[in-house]
Amino acid sequence: MSEESETTSSGKDVGAGMAIGLALGVAIGSATDNLGLWLAIGVALGAAIGAGLSNRE
């Protein structure tokens, strides 16, 4: 596998994680009426989960 395709795959994992975190953050933020806080938490956790998924082999 070329180095470029590994980078693209890694970016997709992080992007997918951020999208899931964003969705969860919006849902929790809407339910608790604190959208700003949960939006930021969701994106941060999603990026962390996506980075963890991209590092697995």
Image: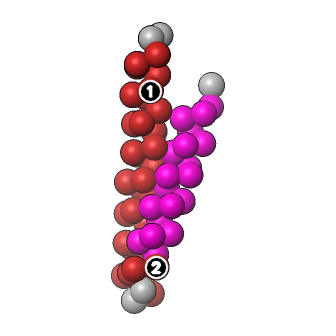
Q: Give the range drawn in magenta.
A: 38-56
- Residue 27, located in which quarter of the rendered image? bottom left
On the picture, is 38 further left or further right than 53?
Answer: left
Residue at image coords 55%, 43%: 51
Locate residue 41, reporting x and y percent. Answer: 50, 69
Type of the residue with mark 2: Leu
Q: Do the residues labelled 1 and 2 touch (CB within 8 Å)?
A: no
| Observer able to see residue 34 | yes
Q: How many labels does the image show?
A: 2
Residue at image coords 46%, 16%: 3
Asked whether residue 44 is drawn in magenta, I would say yes
SS category of the residue bearing label 2: helix
Locate residue 16, reporting x and y percent. Answer: 40, 45
How crowded pointer 1 is (Cα within 10 Å; few <14, some 14-19, many 20+) is rated as few
Q: Name the residue under label 2.
A: 37
How far is disc 1 from disc 2 in space, using C-alphas?
30 Å
Up-down: is 23 above or below 3? below
How crowded pointer 2 is (Cα within 10 Å; few <14, some 14-19, many 20+) is rated as few
The rendered magenta stretch, by its main secondary structure, is classed as helix
SS category of the residue bearing label 1: helix
Asked whether residue 35 is drawn in magenta, I would say no
Locate residue 7, reporting x and y percent. Answer: 44, 26
Residue at image coords 45%, 39%: 13
Residue at image coords 40%, 19%: 5
Task: Identify the mark at residue 7; answer none if there is no mark.
Answer: 1
| Quarter of the image with the C terminus in it | top right
Type of the residue with mark 1: Thr
Of callouts 1 and 2, the N-terminal one: 1
